[in-house]
């Protein structure tokens, strides 16, 4: 009973029974109206015929004998007719029926006048003196030389007709109609069940395929193949399910990859934090234990080493904090127009002394006619600082680190290149991963947090800018990204 087919079948039964019942009732009403209209039209001359045979009211007195004789003749023609003689107010003056069977002594004349005038279309129903029902009738005016004396009122379908109709309805017509209605309902339900079975067959197949894919944790692919064209709603649902299952599978794989990266990140963080902490702890414990016996030079050397590890720990924690803010979407670039050549020269000046102390030349090449660009100047400065610091770390004495800007179509390109150790081709796709270090990068572990390039990538993603890398081992590396040109600058 919980299946869609069962529910549709029950709904069909209810609808068919309701419609069949309504149709049966309306058919009976329409049939009765049709019969009454036909009866009234066919028997309309009866009252006129009777009044034309005799003077039923003479000098204001009803001729009941003539009325009884004419009523018997009329009933021969139509056994269901019941004749009444009325005065001008509708009061019954006489009839040819058992007196105790007549329950009313007054008849409403409005329907009679409407029938005689022809102002209302049949069927027109009037009072039945022998019951509380309204019935069709025939009527005619009774006139003499003195004018209107009354009305002849002929009820069509009296008690004899009612009794006969009830007997026939209970015996044959009612039984036949009932069985016919039952057969029609059963046939309609059977046809509907077969149609619904065909229509829900594809839905059942799709539901089974959904359960199979869901039970596999979305590792299995859907087997159902919808048509290439638009199709109906079931085909559209199948295509949506195929797309959804593929998306869920991709998300599951992404979650697995994220979990792997998370474990790797925790491992790397633990290693990178433990190394400077252990070194600091070792040197500080040595200072405490051997404080009296250590020469001043040795004590100073230990303190400098501890300070160096503390500084590295501070850099690592700062980079982690900055990267977490960038990943949490809590940082929104404050885009504004600024002078890119000035920023490049400021960054080059910032690292001039550090590069000079290592025997590295800092060069600046301004090959752009565009002086202004759009972006967050603070974040772009952070990108340049990380790239320059990274270049200095991997460039030997006598090498060169170059900052350059050049024009592109609707943009200006910023590049940081060096003549350092370079990067192997297999390492380039992963250099922007957190804590990932190349073989050459292991040499600079003590001076790097391993997060600089990851921060660069995230900042440029916020600016919708793509960074590219070109590198050759033992020759050098070049990082380049683009920023939009600000044309309205003065």
Image (tube, helix red, strand yellow):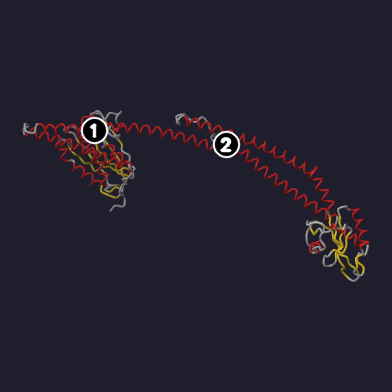
Residue placed furthest toward the bottom: 146
Task: Look at mark 2 in the image and give the residue it sits on.
Answer: 2
Residue at 18% x, 41% y is 351
Q: Position of residue 74 (x, y in %)?
A: 90, 56
Helix, strand or loop at disc 2? loop
Sequence order check, earlier mark of 2 and 1:
2
Q: Position of residue 461 (x, y in %)?
A: 33, 41
Residue 45 in view (yes/no)? no
Task: Look at mark 1 in the image and give the residue it sits on.
Answer: 272
Q: Nearer the viewer, residue 29 or 296?
A: 29
Q: Nearer the viewer, residue 358 or 63?
A: 63
Q: Quadrant of residue 276?
A: top left
Q: Position of residue 119 (x, y in %)?
A: 78, 62
Tag nearer the camera, 2 or 1:
2
Q: Is residue 59 above or below residue 217?
A: below
**Quarter of the figure that contains the N terminus:** top right
Q: Quadrant of residue 451?
A: top left
Residue at 34% x, 31% y is 260
Residue 201 in view (yes/no)? yes
Q: Is residue 120 above or below residue 362?
A: below
């Amino acid at each position: 009973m919980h299946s869609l087919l069962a529910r549709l079948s029950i709904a069909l039964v209810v609808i068919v029974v309701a419609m069949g019942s309504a149709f049966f009732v309306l058919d009976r009403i329409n049939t009765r109206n049709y019969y009454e209209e036909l009866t009234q039209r066919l028997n309309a001359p009866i009252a006129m015929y009777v009044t034309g045979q005799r003077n039923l009211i003479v000098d204001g007195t009803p001729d009941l004998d003539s009325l009884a004789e004419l009523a018997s003749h009329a009933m021969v023609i139509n056994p269901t007719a019941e004749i009444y003689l009325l005065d001008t107010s509708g009061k019954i003056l006489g009839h040819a029926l058992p007196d105790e069977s007549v329950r009313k002594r007054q008849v409403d004349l409005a329907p009679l006048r409407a029938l005689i005038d022809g102002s209302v279309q049949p069927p027109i129903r009037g009072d039945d003196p022998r019951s509380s029902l309204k019935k069709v009738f025939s009527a005619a005016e009774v006139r003499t030389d003195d004018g209107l004396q009354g009305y002849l009122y002929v009820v069509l379908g009296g008690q004899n007709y009612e009794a006969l109709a009830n007997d026939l309805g209970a015996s044959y017509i009612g039984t036949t109609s009932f069985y016919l209605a039952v057969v029609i309902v059963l046939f309609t339900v059977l046809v509907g069940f077969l149609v619904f079975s065909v229509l829900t067959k594809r839905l059942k197949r799709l539901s089974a395929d959904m359960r199979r894919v869901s039970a596999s944790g979305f590792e299995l692919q859907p087997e159902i193949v919808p048509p290439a064209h638009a199709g109906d709603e079931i085909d559209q649902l199948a295509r949506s399910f195929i797309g959804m299952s593929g998306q869920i599978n991709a998300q599951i794989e992404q979650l697995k990859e994220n979990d792997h990266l998370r474990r790797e990140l925790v491992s790397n963080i633990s290693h990178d934090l433990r190394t400077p902490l252990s070194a600091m702890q070792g040197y500080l414990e040595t200072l405490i234990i051997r404080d009296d016996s250590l020469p001043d030079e040795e004590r100073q050397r230990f303190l400098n080493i501890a300070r160096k590890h503390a500084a590295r720990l501070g850099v690592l924690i700062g980079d982690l904090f900055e990267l977490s803010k960038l990943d949490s979407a809590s940082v929104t670039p404050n885009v504004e127009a600024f002078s890119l050549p000035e920023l490049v020269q400021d960054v080059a000046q910032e690292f001039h002394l550090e590069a000079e102390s290592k025997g590295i030349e800092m060069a600046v090449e301004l090959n752009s006619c565009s002086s202004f660009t759009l972006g967050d100047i603070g974040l772009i400065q952070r990108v340049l600082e990380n790239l320059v610091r990274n270049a200095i770390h991997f460039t030997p004495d006598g090498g060169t680190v170059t900052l350059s800007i050049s024009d592109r179509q609707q943009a200006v390109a910023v590049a940081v290149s060096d003549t350092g150790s370079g990067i192997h081709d297999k390492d380039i796709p992963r250099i922007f991963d957190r804590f990932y270090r190349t073989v050459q990068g292991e040499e600079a572990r003590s001076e790097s947090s391993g997060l600089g390039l990851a921060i660069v990538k995230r900042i440029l993603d916020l600016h919708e800018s793509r960074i590219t890398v070109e590198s050759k081992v033992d020759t050098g590396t070049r990082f380049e990204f683009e920023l939009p040109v600000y044309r309205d600058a003065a």
